[in-house]
Image (tube, rainbow, N blue to C red):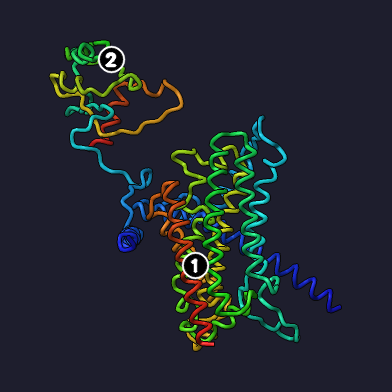
């Protein structure tokens, strides 16, 4: 009986998280276009429903009914597989992210923890799966039999490997502080007010994480694999219909995941701003913080121009990685001196 | 290096919270310029009929030859256009007809949007040109 309850709990949690994530992704596309509009003194989408709120559904219907083209010279199996890899990797990231603390179902003594899986190697899992998502982009451009697609893939491979190094090193400081890879524990250690959040102990790591995160998900200052101007959309050039929509959704889900990890590691996850505000549920705090991070991602997207390829490589290898290493050394030194 | 980046963020945030300058066209229309040349209209005389005396000057001056006039005389010996046809689909809105008119009968109006599924409705007769007056106060 206990096993059955567990099974039901996991299935319900998966469905709820998946549904919420898909809605978040849908409205992130809306938010991105709306923000682009408002920053450029336009309205953005405002035809479908009030404030264009039905736009994501209109886009989904459009994507469903478009012709699904597979180029004749493409590697068909890989071509079909690539968007699947991308979306599966992006969604799987949410398996370990703690959205809130636990609550007891009223009338019973059944405790529900607000996370799908609470595994010991949560952070490792996240970085492993996030790297898997790159295969979607690399294989997608490679298999489409298009020179621009191939260029996009090559750039994606080079850029993501470069920035993943800095990304990995930048979060080791947090690991040293929390002595655990389990995300729940990292969040629990940051409890009791915003002055306990890791961002005050690891400000450099936070900035590095945000920058490398942007490079990881190919957001605008680092969107070399897409590069509309010179590569005509890069790796997804041959994709149409739902396959393109999957890539698009994977990109936004990945962005949400990177934001969620940033919130978990640096902003105290579901912990309230000050302990007196703990009557507001943790999930709400998590969503507010996540929204702020996602807002920042989109805000900078419409502010900064794209870096050149050599600039990206120089910035990654000559600035970010040394900075991350110095941050790591200083953190280690301080922690070991304090005992 | 970091200060200019922050300044950039400040600028975009300022624009994010300012009002868009877009004119929402079908709902909200900007008035055309004072000297805008749109669809022609006929001025009425005191009897409520057209002022046109069918002299044919507009027909002669029209570069795209979109005006066709048949002249007739009424019982008082007044000339009037028996048929006055202005093919708006051929008109280039040069305004020569307005300039050439000796009795100030035809004027260029303000209307700039006119969509039809067929060519026939674009053929403007005297009645239609008189009707067009109400869009040009």
What percent of the width, then of the height, locates residue B42? 23, 26
- Distance, label 1 to label 2, CA atoms, is 77 Å
Chain containing the residue with disc 1 = A
Residue B71 seen by the camera: yes
User: In the image, is A144 to the left or to the right of A110?
Assistant: left
**Residue at the extreme left:** B102
Q: Hey, which quadrant is residue A7 in on the image? A: bottom right
Disc 2: CA contacts within 10 A as few (<14), some (14-19) or many (>=20): few
Q: Residue at x 65, y 47 (%)?
A: A83
Q: Hey, which quadrant is residue B125 in on the image? A: top left
**Between residues A50 and A20, which one lies in front from this camera angle?**
A20
Chain containing the residue with disc 2 = B
Q: Residue at x 38, y 50 (%)?
A: A305
Q: Residue at x 57, y 83 (%)?
A: A189
What percent of the width, then of the height, locates residue A119? 70, 73
Question: In terms of secondary structure, where does tag 2 sit?
Answer: loop
**Which residue is identified by label 2?**
B64
**Which residue is identified by label 1?**
A325
Residue A46 seen by the camera: no
Question: Which tag is nearer the camera, tag 1 or tag 2?
Answer: 1
Disc 1: CA contacts within 10 A as few (<14), some (14-19) or many (>=20): some
Q: Residue at x 52, y 62 (%)?
A: A166
What percent of the width, then of the height, locates residue B24? 36, 47
């Amino acid at each position: 009986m206990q096993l059955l309850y567990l099974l039901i709990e996991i299935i319900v949690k998966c469905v709820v998280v998946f549904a919420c994530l898909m809605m978040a992704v849908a409205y992130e596309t809306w938010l991105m276009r709306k923000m682009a509009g408002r920053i450029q003194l336009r309205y953005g989408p405002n035809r479908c429903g009030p404030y264009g709120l039905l736009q994501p559904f209109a886009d989904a219907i459009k994507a469903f009914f478009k012709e699904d083209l597979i180029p004749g010279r493409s590697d068909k199996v890989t071509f079909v597989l690539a968007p699947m890899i991308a979306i599966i990797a992006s969604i799987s990231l949410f398996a370990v992210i703690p959205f809130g603390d636990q609550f007891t179902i009223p009338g019973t003594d059944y405790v529900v923890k607000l996370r799908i899986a609470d595994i010991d190697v949560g952070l490792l899992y996240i970085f492993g799966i996030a790297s898997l998502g790159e295969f979607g982009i690399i294989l997608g451009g490679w298999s489409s039999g298009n020179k621009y697609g191939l260029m996009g893939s090559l750039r994606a491979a080079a850029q993501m490997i470069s920035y993943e190094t800095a990304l990995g090193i930048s979060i080791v400081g947090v690991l040293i502080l929390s002595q655990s890879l389990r995300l729940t524990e990292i969040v629990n250690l940051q409890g009791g007010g915003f002055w306990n959040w890791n961002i005050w102990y690891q400000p450099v790591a936070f900035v590095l994480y945000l920058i490398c995160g942007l490079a990881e998900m190919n957001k605008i200052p680092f969107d070399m694999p897409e590069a509309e101007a010179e590569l005509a959309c890069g790796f997804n050039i041959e994709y149409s219909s739902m396959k393109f929509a999957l890539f698009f959704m994977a990109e936004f889900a990945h962005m949400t995941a990177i934001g969620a990890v940033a919130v978990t590691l640096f902003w105290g996850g579901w912990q309230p701003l000050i302990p007196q505000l703990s009557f507001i549920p943790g999930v709400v705090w998590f969503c507010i913080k996540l929204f702020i991070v996602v807002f920042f991602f989109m805000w900078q997207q419409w502010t900064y121009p794209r870096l050149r390829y050599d600039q990206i490589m120089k910035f990654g290898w000559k600035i970010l990685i040394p900075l991350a290493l110095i941050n790591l050394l200083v953190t280690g030194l301080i922690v070991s001196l304090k005992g | 290096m970091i200060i200019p980046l922050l300044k950039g963020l400040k600028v975009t945030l300022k624009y994010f919270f300012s009002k868009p300058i877009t004119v929402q066209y079908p709902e909200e229309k900007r008035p055309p310029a004072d000297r805008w040349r749109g669809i022609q209209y006929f001025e009425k005389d005191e009897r409520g009929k057209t002022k046109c005396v069918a002299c044919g000057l507009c027909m002669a001056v029209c570069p795209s030859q979109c005006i066709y006039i048949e002249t007739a005389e009424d019982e008082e010996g007044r000339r009037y256009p028996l048929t006055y046809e202005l093919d708006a689909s051929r008109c280039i809105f040069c305004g020569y007809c307005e300039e050439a008119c000796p009795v100030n009968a035809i004027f260029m109006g303000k209307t700039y949007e006119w969509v039809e599924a067929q060519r026939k409705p674009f053929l403007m007769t005297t009645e239609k040109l008189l009707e067009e007056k109400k869009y040009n106060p």
